[in-house]
Amino acid sequence: MFSFINWNIDPEIFAVGSVSIRWYGLLFASGFLFGQRIMAHIFKVEKVEESLLDSLLLTMVISTVLGARIGHFAFYEPSVFMNDPLQVIMPPFAGLASHGALIGILLALLVYSRTQKMHFFWLTDRMVIVAALGGFFIRLGNLMNSEIVGKVTDVPWAFLFLRNTEFLPVYPRHPAQLYEALSCLVLFGVLYFLWNRFRGQTPQGMLLSIFIIWVFGLRFLFEYLKENQEAFEAGLPFNMGQILSIPAVLLGVGILIYSLSNKNKAIWYN
């Protein structure tokens, strides 16, 4: 049997004057760093022009942050758009929504694929491999921040989030961030295996559909174990994370049907 885990990690690693280095920022950046190396390997194996990597990385960074920020305020704090719209693009970038990131990334990759004359589904099928790994790092960052905590529970692996001041007094809670992090890590392994073993046989769009259905299908279920992020969600039959996950899963199912019915050849260029 496990005992409750006292989680008392300082979100700040160190500070130099007014500049602080935090675990969340380091882990967030790690997702892009490792993702860039994985995509370099994929491009090399599939004989894609490696010169495209830098612009692809920049596209992913901008679309992820901007999409997640706009999504957060659009879905959770819409009044900010009217009262202080500059807050959306100004640091410290507190508040990121994964559903907004999905929309931002897909739109950006659609534009990118057209300008670079690449197949959209070929590109997204590779990008979701690194996106899954990025999701792992981001949820670990949430854990280090003691945020997005789970509901009170008596399971033996429950965490006591001693630095979380949003929900007091401190009770043992589900480490919901860790659940999602591990699910993303498993997904990364599954997607990489499928690409590595069957990339010449997998219909375009298949890996993208698996990613969307897996991430947001599990997100819908994990929300039952998490505290609501905003007060207005208390009166809803489903919280905002669940409401947004339903169309995301339907999108994934639609892409899966398209993928299985078309079975386009897996080439990267138009």
Image (cartoon, helix red, strand yellow):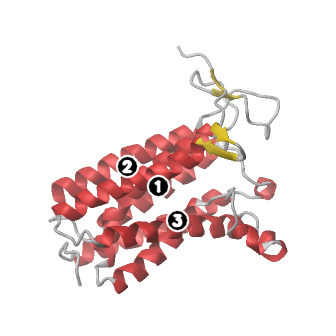
Name the quarter where the C terminus is drawn.
bottom left
Disc 2/disc 1 C-alpha distance (Å): 8 Å
| Residue that mark 3 sits on | 64
From the top left corner, tell me how far across and down residue 205 is, in percent.
31, 70
> At 57% from the left edge and 69% from the top edge, which residue is drawn?
67
- Residue 189 visible in the displayed image: yes
Badge 2 crowding class, 10 Å Cα cut-off, few under 14, some 14 to 19, many 20 or more, is many
Disc 1/disc 3 C-alpha distance (Å): 16 Å
| Image-based side of 58 in relation to 119, left or right | right
Labels 2 and 1: the sequence-earlier one: 2
The local secondary structure at tag 2 comes to helix
| Image-based side of 113 in relation to 246, left or right | left
**Callout 2 touching callout 1 (CB < 8 Å):** yes
Badge 3 crowding class, 10 Å Cα cut-off, few under 14, some 14 to 19, many 20 or more, is many
Badge 1 crowding class, 10 Å Cα cut-off, few under 14, some 14 to 19, many 20 or more, is many
Based on the displayed image, in which of its 4 quarters is residue 199 positioned?
bottom left
> At 60% from the left edge and 25% from the top edge, which residue is drawn?
155
Task: Give the residue type that dot 2 points to.
Answer: Leu
Q: Nearer the viewer, mark 2 or mark 3?
A: 3
79, 245: nearer the viewer = 79
Based on the displayed image, in which of its 4 quarters is residue 94 positioned?
bottom right
Task: Give the residue type that dot 3 points to.
Answer: Thr
Name the disc covering residue 187, or none. 2
| Residue that mark 1 sits on | 215
From the top left corner, tell me how far across and down residue 171 is, in percent.
74, 27
Q: Residue furthest top?
A: 1
The local secondary structure at tag 1 comes to helix
The local secondary structure at tag 3 comes to helix
Disc 2/disc 3 C-alpha distance (Å): 19 Å
> At 49% from the left edge and 52% from the top edge, which residue is drawn?
29
Labels 1 and 3: the sequence-earlier one: 3
Task: Give the residue type that dot 1 points to.
Answer: Val
